[in-house]
Amino acid sequence: MSKVNKYWISLLIGLIFVTIFLITTDWSSLLKALLKANYWYLIPACIFYQASTFCRAFRWRILLRHIKKISTLNLYPVVVVGYMANNLLPLRVGELVRAYYIGERESISSVSALTTIFIERLFDALTLLSFLVILALFVPMMELAKEFSNLSNVPWFLLPVIISVPFVIMFALVIMSAYRPLTIENLVRILIRPIPDIIGKRILHFARFVIMGLDGLKDPKLILFLFILSLPIWLLESALFFSVGYSFNLNEFYSSFADMVAAILIVTSLSNIGSSVPSTPGGLGLFELIARETLVLLPIASIDRSIAAAYVVVVHAVLIIPMIVLGQVFLLTGNMTIKKIWRNKDILDINDSDSKY
């Protein structure tokens, strides 16, 4: 399937999600909520998000240091460009764009860089899942699961499994690849036996580069350090959600400050885990649905669906628009365009990577 066809399919999926979001929202009430909002709170929200992104660049520096030592200041624009690409292109292509862009800027293997990005995303998911586990001790999460079960027709007890197990399995495989690289390579050899030799060799070559990129995870102290570094990333992004909440006076719906903090952390966690599935540009539609329904269905407050809808629309705008603008600035100053990267058919050319690693 061509890139163009995939793009249009993702837009169609996004249109379906957006349509569901719109038809289940009272438009007039949503507009009233948008008009009444205090948008001064978006200033600290944007600052929190950029601080989160800078922390992400610092964590990436730690992951990349066994490949090449690169400063956080040099990595920050690359992270921003990756976010911009995720917001403009479907199927989370921004991760490939980031790998290609850092490979071009720093003359390193794009495949190995992509591996570190994959590790990043696993730590992100595990951090957010940790938030949910801790919050379940204080918030009736079972009630929320049952509400989502009624909407999705999935048994409520399976929802936590669906959300968490894939990430836990992937993390276990990553750790095994770091400690037992030959075991994983032999497993890949077994899996590619039915595949034509020319394709199988390419898959095996790719797998070797991925395993090389995981070499740095042999140190348990590094794993703990990466998890600790993931905390400020997501606490700062949660602060963005929290700040926008004050724009819509969400604090008035909660009996205590702690309840609002818990609710915002849950919304941040579920909306980001849910929209991490490769789909539409920026997770458009899916993000809004998950965030809105989480906010409305949480039993610790009674929030009108229209106000919740207006809130998540603004949150998503703060997540997307500044990154697109800033990413374009960084690309222009680096004499690069997103179109040029997207059209590059060898974003992850393994043969070229040999000379860069």
Image: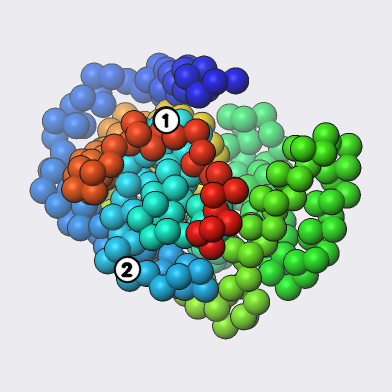
Residue that label 2 marks:
72
Residue 186 visible: yes
* Viewer-nearest of discs 2 and 1: 1
User: What secondary structure is found at the residue carrying circle 2?
Assistant: helix
Residue at position x 29%, y 37% in the image: 337
- Residue 222 image offset from top left, x and y in percent: 55, 78
* Residue 226 visible, this orientation: no
Q: In this view, does 38 lie above or below 128?
A: above
Can you give x and y, in whole percent of width and height, for residue 189 in the image? Answer: 84, 51
- 10 Å crowding of disc 2: few (<14), some (14-19), many (20+): some
Quarter the N terminus occupies: top right
Vertically, is 335 above or below 304? below
As drawn, 108 above or below 88? below
Three-letter code, disc 2 = Thr
Q: Residue 343 carries which label?
A: 1
Q: Quadrant of the C terminus?
A: bottom right
Give the amino acid type for the residue marked by disc 1 in the picture: Arg
Residue 238: x %, y % from top left: 35, 57
Task: Compute the Cα span from label 2 to label 1.
Answer: 28 Å
Residue found at x 32% / y 68%: 72
On the rendered structure, is 39 left or right of 75? left
Quadrant hosting residue 230: bottom left
